Image (tube, rainbow, N blue to C red):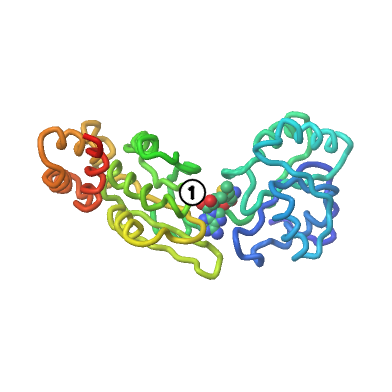
């Protein structure tokens, strides 16, 4: 195991540095050391990073690097690397490049022959996997789902037979609809909603997808930041290419029966709760 010496002098190059996802105590000693040694810090939002640096008594020049200014900012950062500067890349929270900007900068720096290294640390998706109690031998990180129901259902449908736990980020205001779509497409798998990780109101709610959809659909939208983990298909389902998802069955059933009967019928076939299917059936028949 390599030793971390606090006097370690950094080589010129690019350092991808993970920062806390809520609890400031999670900034590692090495992350702090690197941020204190670099010439320049490229960050998503200079105000957010300035707060982190102030809390750690670090003062460094900050340059914004986010999804909208990449083409303009990247050549400037590359020019600094070419001059022999030490540059850190951070995001607002967690590990850069994980649903955050950075991959093009890392690729360009690598291709230009610069030294590129990372200081690993907090990542909401990985922490959620540590807490969800789902198999982690294979998992698929899916970023953020689409916002609209149809696109979101297609997004889940594409993974119907993926033999892996699914991990994704979702906004609190959309989580109930998203879980309902997940339940209607993927069936009644295990899920976990991991909220406000490392923060005061940290919470992990485990249930089947229907139960989670019903819980978050019942009250006000939850507060804070969320990662959803969904377990793999139950053993035996993965290879069944004729299996139909609840959404498809519901659409077919609605052609022949009432909303209530269709919801009850599909609930029996799929284990998705009747309540979730009923409200989805109402949506599908709206305007008929
Ligand atoms: N790069 C970050 C990482 O390593 O986790 C993720 C950046 S992504 C733009 C932000 C999303 O991550 C949030 O919308 C939320 O879904 C999730 N997230 C970030 N911090 C979180 C936390 N403390 N608890 C739960 N989810 C969190």
Can residue 124 be seen here? The reply is no
Q: Nearer the viewer, residue 225 or 137?
A: 225
Q: Is 145 left, or right, of 100 in this rendering?
A: left
Measured as percent of width and height from the top left, residue 165 is found at 40, 47
Q: Check the image and name the residue furthest to the right.
A: 83
Q: Is 126 left, or right, of 221 in this rendering?
A: right
- The relative height of residue 41 versus residue 31 in the rendered view (above or below) is above
For image coordinates 21% across by 31% down, the residue present is 242
Measured as percent of width and height from the top left, residue 60 is found at 83, 54
**The image quarter in which residue 25 lies:** bottom right
Total number of numbered discs in the rendering: 1
Q: Check the image and name the residue furthest to the bottom.
A: 200
Q: Is 147 left, or right, of 272 in this rendering?
A: right
**The image quarter in which residue 270 lies:** top left
For image coordinates 80% across by 49% down, the residue present is 62
Measured as percent of width and height from the top left, residue 78 is found at 80, 34
For image coordinates 76% across by 42% down, the residue present is 14
Give the quarter of the figure containing the N terminus.
bottom right
Can residue 75 be seen here? The reply is yes
Q: Is 249 left, or right, of 60 in this rendering?
A: left
Measured as percent of width and height from the top left, residue 220 is found at 39, 61
- The relative height of residue 278 versus residue 148 in the rendered view (above or below) is below
Is label 1 in a helix, a strand or a loop? strand
Callout 1 crowding tier (Cα within 10 Å): few <14, some 14–19, many ≥20: many
The residue that mark 1 highlights is 169
Say whether mark 1 is within 8 Å of ligand 1: yes
Give the quarter of the figure containing the C terminus.
top left
Q: Nearer the viewer, residue 171 or 109?
A: 171
Q: Nearer the viewer, residue 267 or 229?
A: 267
């Amino acid at each position: 195991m390599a030793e971390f010496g606090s006097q370690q002098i950094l080589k010129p190059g690019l350092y991808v540095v993970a920062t806390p996802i809520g609890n400031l105590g999670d900034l590692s000693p090495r992350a702090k050391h690197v941020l204190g040694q670099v010439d320049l810090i490229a960050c998503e939002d200079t105000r957010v990073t300035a707060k982190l640096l102030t809390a750690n008594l670090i003062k460094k020049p900050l340059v914004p690097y986010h999804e909208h200014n990449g083409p303009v900012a990247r050549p400037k950062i590359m020019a600094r690397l070419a001059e022999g500067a030490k540059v850190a890349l951070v995001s607002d929270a967690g590990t850069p490049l994980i649903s955050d900007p950075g991959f093009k900068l890392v690729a360009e720096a690598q291709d230009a022959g610069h030294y590129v290294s990372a200081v690993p640390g907090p990542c909401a998706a990985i922490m959620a996997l540590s807490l969800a109690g789902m198999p982690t031998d294979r998992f698929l990180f899916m970023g953020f789902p689409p916002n609209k129901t149809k696109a979101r259902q297609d997004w889940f449908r594409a993974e119907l037979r993926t033999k892996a736990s699914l991990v994704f980020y979702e906004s609190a205001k959309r989580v109930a609809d998203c879980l309902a779509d997940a339940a209607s497409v993927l069936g009644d798998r295990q899920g976990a909603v991991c909220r406000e990780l490392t923060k005061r109101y940290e919470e992990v709610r485990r249930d089947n997808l229907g139960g989670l959809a019903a819980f978050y659909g019942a009250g006000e939208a939850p507060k804070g930041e969320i990662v959803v983990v969904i377990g793999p298909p139950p053993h035996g389902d993965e290879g069944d290419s004729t299996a139909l998802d609840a959404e498809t069955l519901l659409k077919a059933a609605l052609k022949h029966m009432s909303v209530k009967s269709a919801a009850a019928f599909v609930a029996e076939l799929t284990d998705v709760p009747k309540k979730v299917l009923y409200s989805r059936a109402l949506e599908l028949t709206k305007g008929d």
